[in-house]
Image (cartoon, rainbow, N blue to C red):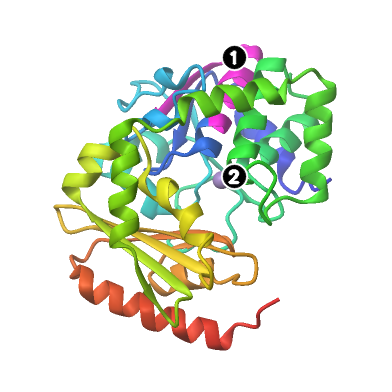
């Protein structure tokens, strides 16, 4: 079990009471599950945790009880902060802009992450633990908790399992390691009921009729490039407003894109009215180029799941052209496993 730097965490958090738990501007099942688990652990340790995310927790994550305790308003008093599931400034921009940097940079700030490649790192972080061997931040927190003898209640383990299952897509993708299974085994032995968690998630992730029809529109608009190996779709602000709160559009369409014959990589671009753009990249097993593609645009991630954000108001068509040519380049230069 790796534990590089885990002692430092205990040091940083000792004698601190008000601990701010921060998710990036792209909350997902891992970041939320990790936040909720940390909230439990720190509470069990007698501390006062506070969960923050600059953007609203999307509806498809409301199956995790306690999501509504995540606030988009910063607390007045912070003794230390923990940023989960991201280690780039790019994804805490809203926090920085809302004057949050002064609040957190003046106190110890811990970063817990598992992303492979990161650009624009957080300069004021006191300690950064980013371990790409971990399937998820949830798995990382589990390991830290074991190492530091933190209390792991059933509730905490449920949140951590949710985090782990979210990033590994139910232990099905390549982020899953033998250690991930060992952690799962420990959780199940401790009494976590995985089928019950899956049922809760499925119930919440059902599509409404309007989402179902929206999915058809995304499918219709999907374009194929690079000899059919790249599936691409972009969506404007109006659709982000209408559909994102109840269902994350990339999650709605990417599994089907990757299930299309010949497709190895898919990109969903969200174009916001203020000119900024975010891209979600997913790849099939034989095409481990997601992080490499994201890096071309200043982003990062894993081989099979990555993303980037652009704030320089480029035209969607221009970005698309760059994505296509970068993909073609990577497909011809990356050795397929
Ligand atoms: Mn993650």
Q: Quadrant of ligand 1?
A: top right
Res 282 visible: no
Q: Please provide percent x and percent y for residue 116.
A: 60, 60
Q: Earlier in the sequence, mark 1 or mark 2?
A: 1
Determine if the C-beta at disc 2 is less than 8 A from ligand 1. yes
- As drawn, 281 above or below 176: below
- As drawn, 214 above or below 81: below
Q: Which residue is mark 1?
A: 43
Q: Which residue is mark 2?
A: 167
- Magenta segment includes 42: yes
Q: Give the main secondary structure of the magenta stretch.
A: helix
Which residue appears at 50% of the width and 24% of the height? 203
- Magenta segment includes 265: no
In the rendered structure, the answer to whether residue 76 lies left or right of residue 88 reads left
The numbered disc on residue 113 is none
**Quadrant the C terminus occupies:** bottom right
> In the rendered structure, which segment of residues is drawn in magenta?
33-52
Q: Please provide percent x and percent y for residue 84.
A: 53, 39
């Amino acid at each position: 079990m790796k534990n590089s730097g885990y002692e430092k965490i205990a040091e940083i958090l000792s004698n601190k009471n008000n601990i701010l738990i921060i998710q990036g501007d792209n909350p997902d099942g891992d970041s939320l599950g990790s936040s909720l688990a940390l909230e439990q652990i720190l509470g069990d340790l007698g501390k006062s945790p506070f969960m923050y995310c600059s953007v609203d927790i999307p509806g498809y994550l409301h199956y995790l009880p306690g999501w509504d305790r995540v606030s988009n308003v910063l607390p007045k008093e912070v003794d230390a902060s923990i940023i989960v599931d991201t280690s780039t400034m790019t994804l805490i921009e809203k926090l920085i802009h809302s004057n949050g940097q002064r609040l957190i940079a003046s106190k110890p700030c811990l970063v817990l992450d598992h992303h492979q490649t990161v650009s624009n790192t957080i300069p004021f972080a006191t300690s950064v633990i980013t371990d790409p061997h971990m399937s998820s931040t949830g798995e990382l927190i589990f390991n830290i908790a074991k190492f530091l003898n933190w209390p792991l209640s059933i509730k905490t383990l449920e949140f951590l399992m949710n985090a782990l299952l979210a990033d590994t897509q139910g232990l099905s993708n390549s982020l899953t390691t033998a250690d991930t299974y060992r952690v799962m085994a420990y959780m199940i032995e401790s009494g976590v009921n995985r089928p019950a968690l899956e049922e809760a998630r499925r119930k919440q992730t059902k599509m409404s009729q309007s989402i179902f029809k929206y999915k058809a529109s995304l499918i219709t608009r999907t374009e194929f490039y690079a000899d059919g190996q790249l599936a691409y779709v972009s969506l404007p602000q109006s659709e982000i407003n209408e559909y994102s709160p109840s269902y994350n559009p990339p999650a709605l369409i990417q599994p089907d894109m990757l299930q299309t014959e010949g497709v190895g990589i898919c990109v969903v671009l969200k174009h916001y009215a203020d000119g900024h753009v975010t891209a979600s990249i997913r790849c099939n097993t034989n095409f481990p180029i997601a992080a490499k593609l994201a890096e071309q645009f200043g982003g990062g991630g894993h081989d099979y799941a990555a993303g980037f954000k652009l704030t320089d108001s480029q035209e969607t068509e221009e970005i698309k052209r760059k994505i296509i040519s970068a993909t073609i380049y990577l497909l011809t230069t990356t050795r397929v496993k």
